[in-house]
Image (cartoon, helix red, strand yellow):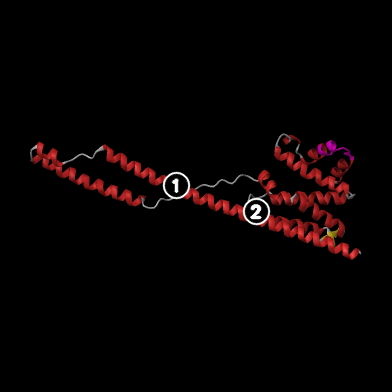
Amino acid sequence: LTVNNMDLLEQAVTAHQLRETLSDVLGLRQHMDEERTQVELDLYFYTVQFAREHNFNKEQTSVLFTIVKRTHEVCTETPLGNLEQCFSYFRELVLCHAVRRPPFSIDLFNAEEVKLIMDYVVNTYFRHYKLYKYVFTPTVRLDLSISYTGLDEIKADANEGGDNEGDKVSQDTGCMEQGPPAVIANEVPEQPASSVEEEKTDLKSYIQRELSAQLSHVHATIAEQMKQSEQQLAERLASIEGRNSSGKNSSKSNRK
């Protein structure tokens, strides 16, 4: 956020005025009817509210706003799971503004403010990480490519059978030119229509069985992957909360 943007935000007193100002600053007013825009506006609105509740100055509010915005952009740049990458990027941005090491970083936030920011973003944004993924990332479409084993052999057998029948027909035609037609008619039996229908039915049932088996396998694989990703996400959030709680306990013991 620029200096002019921060001045406009300072002039917004009520929640409605703050939302209107944020929509103008971020260029979201033209898309206010979209649900995605409302979710994004809520994210930045509550970020500014958090900064106000903890008496952050203009520089701190602007930096916190930018940290949340960039973390959100990294999170939604791909529909794939990148929770660890997003959290590492967020932590680096916070540390760059918490340690005095010019020109690489500045000490804009103290240790207590860093802890407040970490707790707030972890308990709000990263706790609803999958929901933001669902809203802001495109839907991934899976195209199935299925190959059937045994169909080539069936086709080859059918072609060979057709060639043999062609040879028989040519031989029978030669016999028709030489022998009596009554005898030739008895030598060339016609294939009944019921056998052709049975072959088509068998082929159709075979294709349906193979397709059902492949789809069942794909569904099971996707379900297992989603279950594993949910377990990993829960474990990571639990570890993050554990570290934060241990940090709070250690700080309380040091104060005592």
- Amino acid type indicated by mark 1: Leu
- Which residue is at a point 59% across and 54% down the rendered structure image? 225
Q: Is residue 30 visible?
A: yes
Please provide percent x and percent y for residue 4. 86, 43
In the rendered structure, find residue 211 and report the number of the disc placed on it: 1
Q: Is residue 164 above or below residue 194?
A: below
Residue 176, quarter of picture: top left
Please provide percent x and percent y for residue 153. 33, 52
Please provide percent x and percent y for residue 22. 81, 40
Q: Earlier in the sequence, mark 1 or mark 2?
A: 1
Question: Circle 2 sits on which residue?
Answer: 230
- Which residue is at a point 84% across and 64% down the rendered structure image? 250
- Mark 1 Cα-neighbour bin, 10 Å: few <14, some 14–19, many ≥20: some
Q: How many marks?
A: 2
Q: Quadrant of the C terminus?
A: bottom right
Quick one: 175 or 151, which is closer to the camera? 151
Q: Main secondary structure of the magenta part?
A: helix
Quick one: 185 or 88, which is closer to the camera? 185
Disc 2 element: helix
Residue at the right extreme of this rendering: 256
Disc 1 element: helix
Q: Is residue 101 visible?
A: no
- Mark 2 Cα-neighbour bin, 10 Å: few <14, some 14–19, many ≥20: few
* 204 with respect to 127 (left or right): left
- Amino acid type indicated by mark 2: Glu
Is residue 18 rendered magenta in the image?
Answer: yes
Residue range highlighted in magenta: 11-19
